[in-house]
Structures are given as C-alpha cells and as structure tokens.
Amino acid sequence: MVQVVFLHPDLGIGGAERLVVDAAVALKSQGCNVQIWTAHHDPTHCFSETLDPDLPVVSVCIPVLRLSRHKKKVLFYCHFPDQLLTQRTSTLKKLYRAPIDFLEEYTTGMADLILVNSQFTAGIFRETFRSLMGVQTDVLYPSLNTRTFDQPSNEAHDLEGLLPEGTSHLFLSLNRYERKKNLGLALEALAALRSTLPASQSVDVHLVVAGGYDERVSENVEHYAELKELSSQLHLGDCVTFLRSPSDSMKVALLRGSHAVLYTPSREHFGIVPVEAMYCCCPVIAVNSGGPLESVAHGKTGFLCEPTAEAFSKAMERLVMEPQLRRDMGQAGRKRVHDKFSLQAFSGQLHDYIVSLSH
C-alpha cells in the first residue's frame, strides 16, 4: 500500500485547504494510506472530512521532512508561491523576507515532482522562481468533490429567514473576508445594477456576501467592518446580507438559488468557487484574469469582465433580463465541470503521479 502524507500549515476552510482535503479523499479512494499533518486545526472551523479519525491531524516541522528527504519522495503541488502572498511595505520587511524567499525557492527545487493548479500558476511559478526555470511543472487542475453538492435540499426552505421577502434576483459573492479578494467590487456592482434597473425590479435584487471568517485573523475582522461601512455609503440598505463562514449546506443552497456568483479577485491562481458554482448550475461573473480564464467559458458558462462595477453590473443585468440565458449557462456550466474538473479524473491523475514516485 502506498503511504501518503500531506503537509499544510493551517487546515482552515479556504480554497487551498479544500484542495488538500479533496486530494486526500481522492487518494484514499484509490487505496492509499493517507495522513494530513498541519500546525493548526480547529474542529469548529474546518471541512467536515477532516473530522474523520482516518485522517489524523498532527503538528510537523517541515524542515525535518526536508532533512530526511533521501528517505521520502516529495511531490510539491504549488497553489501559488508563498512569497507573492506577502507585501514588502518596508525595507525591514524586505530584509526579513529575503532569506525566507530564498529558502522557499531552494526547498521547492528539492521536490521530486512539481505540480501546479493552472497554466496561469505555471507562468507565475517560472517568473518567481528564476533558478527553477528548467524544472518541469505539470498542470493538475483541482477537482470538485461533489458529495456535498449532491445532497438533497430545498433552497427556499434553507434560505428562509435569510433573504428579504420578495427577493427574486439573488447574486452571491463567495470568498474569504480578505482585501485582496476585492469584495467591494460586488457591492459597487450591485449599486450600479440597481441604478439601471426599473424600480419594480431593483427592489427585488439582493446580494449575499459570504465567506471564510476567522476571529484570529485581524484582516478578516477589519475587512468585514469595512465592507459593512461601504454598503452603508452606497445606500444599499437591506439589499445586502453578510454571512461569515457559512455551513456547507447553506453554501450549496445559496449557489443553487442564485442568478450568478460574482467572483471578484484579480489574478487569482485558480479559484475553486467558479467550479462549485458551475456544478450547481449557477453562472459565474468573474474578473478576466488568472484562473477563471481556464475555468469559466466566457459567454457559455458565465462572463469574464474587466474588474469594474460597470462591467460586472452589465453582466448581472443580462442575467436578470434574460432568464433563458441564465438557464442555458447553468446547464453548460454543469457539463463543463463533469468534463474538466471531475473528482474521478483528478483522482486518477494524482494517483498516477504518486505511483510513479513510489517506483
């Protein structure tokens, strides 16, 4: 039996964490013995699969694994270079990060096999790790574990009490409460849409801003307050509902009941939310850069737009005014996920990579 250990620093509820969990589940289904090692795991702020005792969670010092690398095969799945996730706002910060950045590049090159989650990330990898230009990187698209999304539910019942009575045009923003996710764009797009729709329709439009929220993370707390203030400044009133760390069942109900998901980050390395939305027959309105260029088929499963309120609101207006287009895009999105992002295809490819390393 092939033994596989995943290492991830904080097993919360973000896209990267979802990918780790799905990969672990995929390899278990292929007969591998799987463990996840992490420095932090909160049973009240995690994916339900990680509560399974067959996926033990312990602390680990990654350099120890590197030192014992001659005994272990290492597959590195690059979600995005870590050094690009931290701003260098001062000379002191640059000096502090320099050895860490060097270590990241050096240890990444020690891997026996490097996978990336998109062609976009492959390009960023080559731009960032100049000393690894000659290293081959294979693209393995993240999959969608559809088990959660296939559970029977009643959207009207699940959303009862969450939305104002009479809501007929629901849009959803689903992302962590982080400034880089540009969630304010969704609020600005809603305000622009309400100014162009007839009064009889604008009152029926509602936006739910939902996403991962951790009290330990100051940015989550601060940005949540910033978005509430922006909503007030835009005079959106009761047209917006903010949800923090919604349950899986609530997320699925929102995806199934929404006209579209507004996916606002720019240069996002992949982003699993558009795939989740398409599987739920929900069109996606996303920024025309990064991963969505590979996951969303423009004009077929959604719209790829410039990151402006005007561009997003025009796409939203089309989905409000053209119900058949919304339905056609939803069906096309569901098929696209089956064809390109199925768990079966991901499981098979990842297992083949693992087996190739074990020989």
Image: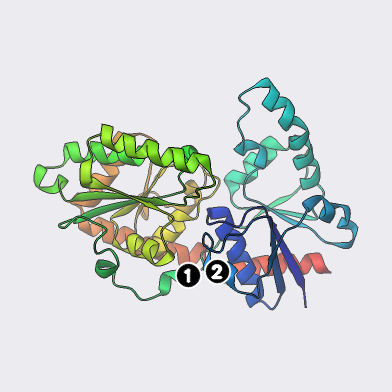
Q: Residue furthest left?
A: 200
User: Which numbered marker is on residue 356?
Assistant: none
Q: Along the polypeptide, which appears first: circle 1 or circle 2?
A: 1
Secondary structure beneath label 1: loop
Tell me the quarter of the image containing the N terminus: bottom right
Q: Residue 289 placed where, x, y %?
A: 48, 40
Toward the top, the furthest residue is 91
At x 16% / y 58%, what residue is drawn?
165
Q: Is residue 311 visible?
A: no
Quarter occupied by the C terminus: bottom right
- Disc 1, disc 2: CB below 8 Å? yes
The residue indicated by pointer 1 is 146
Q: What's the amino acid at mark 2?
A: Leu
Residue 83: percent from left, percent from top: 67, 37
Residue 342 lies left or right of residue 156; in this view the side is right
- Residue 341, percent from left and from top: 52, 63
Q: Between marks 1 and 2, how big is the CA–CA gap?
A: 8 Å
- Badge 1: how crowded within 10 Å, few (<14), some, or many (20+)? some
Q: Label 2: state its secondary structure.
A: helix
Q: Measured along the vertical axis of the image, is residue 80 above or below residue 113?
A: above
Taking the image as shown, residue 197 lies to the left or right of residue 305, namely left
Q: Nearer the viewer, residue 176 or 320?
A: 176
Label 2 Cα neighbours within 10 Å, binned few <14 / some 14-19 / many ≥20: many
State which mark lies toward you, 1 or 2: 1
Which residue lies at the image location 78% right of the left edge and 42% below the top edge? 134
Q: Is residue 148 visible?
A: yes
**Residue closest to the eye, 50 or 320:** 50
Q: Which residue is mark 2?
A: 343
Q: Residue at x 58, y 50 (%)?
A: 118
Q: Residue at x 32, y 58 (%)?
A: 329
Amino acid type, mark 1? Thr
